[in-house]
Amino acid sequence: MSEVIALDQSAHVRPIRTRLAVTLFTFGVLAVVACVLAPLVGSTRISLARAFDRSIPFADNVDAQIFFIARLPRVLAAALVGSALATAGVVFQALLRNPLATPFTLGVSAGASLGAMLVMIAGVGVTAGPVSAVPLASFAGAAVATLIVYVLATPYRRAMSTAVLLLAGVTLNSFFSAIIMFVQYVADFAEAYRAARWLMGDLDVGSFDPLIAAAPLVVIAFGMFALLPSALNVLSLGPDAAATRGVDVARTQRLAFFSAALATSAAVSLAGPIGFIGIVVPHLVRLLVGVDHRIVLPASALFGATFLVVCDLGARTLLAPVEIPVGIVTAMIGGPFFLWLLVRKGS
Amino acid sequence: MAARSQRFLTAFALVVACALLSAAPQQQRIVSLVPALTEMLFAIGVGSSVIGVSNFDAFPPDVSRLPRVGALLDPDTERILSLRPTLVLIYGSQTDLQAQFRRAGIRTYVYRHGGIRTIYQSLQELGDATDHRPQADRVVRDLRARIDAVRTRVAGRPRPRVLLVIGRQPKTLREIYVSGGRGFLHEMLDIAGGQNVFADIARESAQPSQETLIARAPEVVIEVHAEGMFKTSTAEAERAVWSSLPSLPAVRNRRVHVLIGQYLVVPGPRFAEATETLARTLHPEAFK
Amino acid sequence: MTLSADRISYSYSPAKTLPPEGGSHEFTLTDVSVAVSPGSLTGLLGPNGCGKTTLLKLLSGVLKPDSGSVRLGQDELRALSTRAIAQQIAVVPQETHPAFDFTVMEMVLMGRHPHLGAFQLEGPGDLAIAREALVATGTAHLAARAYMTLSGGEKQRVVIASALAQKPKVLLLDEPTASLDLGYQLEIAALLTELNRERGVTMVLATHDLNLAASLCDRLVLVREGRVLMQGPTREALTSATVQQLYGVIADVAFHERAGHLTVIPVSRQ
């Protein structure tokens, strides 16, 4: 009897409903605050009063133009991409049963980069409505990479072997990276520089069009994510252990793989491969809320948005008027963080 | 008697031959890895001596039948050597190449990238290197005269604030590269009667954020692109892309110009023509 | 509800399933029939590689037999969904290595997964079942601890608690004490006995440990090279003769008064 009482008083046994509600509320508020405050700050000083002054015609109101055309889409893009990459990271880590996996481990990002490179350098100018060539080709490249990895890792429609999955992804990564290097090599100077710049990540979308193109994809991915958390918990015990607890392993793996690949593809097509979000955010979140995916997944989605919005804020203000590519900012935070993680685990 | 005269005649013939050979101007064989320098060679009249060009050369049309020997990142040393050049024009960063040619006893001329003054200097230096200095001086004089003429034409006119775009992806305004306050493009703009909105940036090129573009509020936008991803046929469509930034004065006043042509972006003898084009674009009334 | 296998055969090939991760490769089963009556504690006994793990997996529904059928009561496992099976059959593997740092409570609550809907979170009823499982396995005081920080015996007890939380009709265990020290082996053995005798949990235990089988099981199925050598009550199935047939070893099989069950003393190789 006393054992049972002791159980109730221990923190980790607080009912999950409460923990979920508290977590979502806290991280949600954080995300909203970040998204509201970030557009107010930038490399140019603007007057908020003027920006929101309706009496001035928009065409004459530079402050309003900066706020609504330059900053707001950019902050929203950061939120979307950060959220997508962080959540994809969580899902890939669960799928590969490895906390060191990232959204880029399985070659999706390399495929996206190659698609973008080919357009930038070969100069193919195909567009589809409001979507311009580079994001389109980037998404196509990501899709091709995803399919190749899937086919390699799924024999005879059975469950995926995580070992084969990892191998296929890493191999594809190397292969595509080699092609990317070659393409850059044969390009001329300016194109090669532009390609290198794209690989550092860029959230400066300048309009809502790219967001409108990417958002539905991310929403679909999130819809798929919502079906996963409880199964991912069980899946991380191993495929057999998961099966004996009622998880349809093959279906869960497929759902996890494609949803995370979709989110990653959309994010990279929109803003280039911005690294470290997919690993820093899930780990930070796990440190704060534990490892239950039902909490980690939504928390990472919210915290990922906050994280990238803040990183991009730093990228565009720290050395103003010079902009630091946002991928460099996330790397500068992510690198030391990783080292600290390793030291902590080692000790 | 016959044997001795034969030997004497042979010796005499040899001496005359040597004298003739040394007196004749040595036949030049020039390989150029730098398109701008290739154009200069043709401009000063030694085009016929050019026996090899880089992969990126396109002007004048004569170069299309010349062998290609690589470029900045991938110069084909073997190919160059096989052409037996007497002079090779290379980039400053190609130090290994320079050392190789020195060992092979081949003269090199190193390209310096700079403003308009560097273009004049390079022309004259190439003139020295190819024994065509007088011709080079004449070319420089002509160019200076054309530039002065442009200056005169636009003198006294109001100088609009110009955004000079030197690179971007087709169909989108993301990742725009602009000319900063240094380099020949900036100087050409200045001569043509425009004020570079990014003159304060002490670099040849920069990638400003959308926010900065809006904040600088240029009155005119001029894009200069070599043929490639931007074609004359798509120039109009590319102009229309700017309507996504309706706040810019340039867009509102319909003063967005997309100019396409390699002559616009090569720091060579055609820069005067490019300057005239810029001036005509900025101040059409001055050219009526 | 009787769990039974009726003349099942299975041969392992890469086209059918992935190699068991970290486990040994066991191969063909031929014409195996087994019946597990409710409340019994049956042992699948045989040397490594004889097919007992494969048999266990077939009984749990993780593998599907090439021919023959596995039934729980009247239902063929083949016709049931993974969820439906998991609501009635639970498996305790030899080792459990979660990829993430779950707490003991979280591990045990995962046993409720087959009973929860897609978006359902565990309610007070589920928490009560989990607590009960923890108490039954003597691990309630570990509820808030991280699973990975536990000792081998504690870990295995938590995994058993997780399986119990599934409220299964049959509990299948694969070499539950193989990787444990002697002390923990006895601990788990005692726990399993208690669960079977006092709580009536039907169990099937795959093991190569003769003495463990002798001490725990009331029925034995002797498996050799993919076939059933013999099956029946322990006293009948476990004799010097059968041990020799199964292991190729000469051994003494005798009832030990103090221990209260049969013991097997290996004497020499054949």
Image (cartoon, coloured by chain):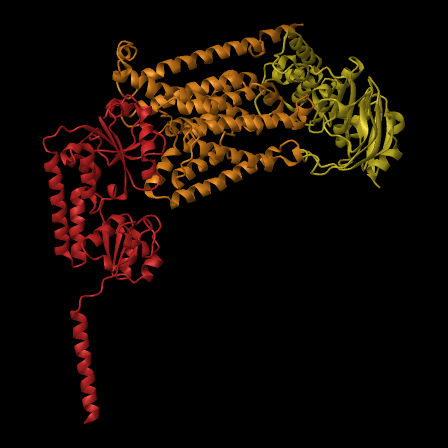
Chain colours: A orange, B red, C yellow
User: Looking at this rendering, what residue extends furthest in the front direction?
Assistant: B288
Residue A122, quarter of the rendered image: top left
Horizontally, is A145 left or right of B30 in the view?
right
Tell me which residue sits at (31%, 52%) in the image.
B54
Q: Quadrant of residue B28?
A: bottom left
Vertical comparison of A268 with C163: above or below: below
Of all residues, the one furthest to the bottom in this rendering is: B1
| Residue B115 pos. (x, y %) | 19, 41
Of residues B48 and A70, the one nearer the viewer is B48
| Residue A320 visible to an observer of this rendering | no
Is residue B219 shown left or right of residue A9? left
- Mark yes or no: residue C106 visible: yes
C84 vs B162: above or below: above
Q: Nearer the viewer, residue B102 or B30?
A: B30
Residue B12 picture location, percent across and down: 17, 82
Q: Quadrant of residue B98?
A: bottom left
Q: Position of residue A313 (x, y in %)?
A: 35, 21
Identify the residue at horizontal 71%, vertical 35% (top origin).
C16
- Which image quadrant: the N terminus of chain C? top right
Q: Nearer the viewer, residue A17 or A274?
A: A274
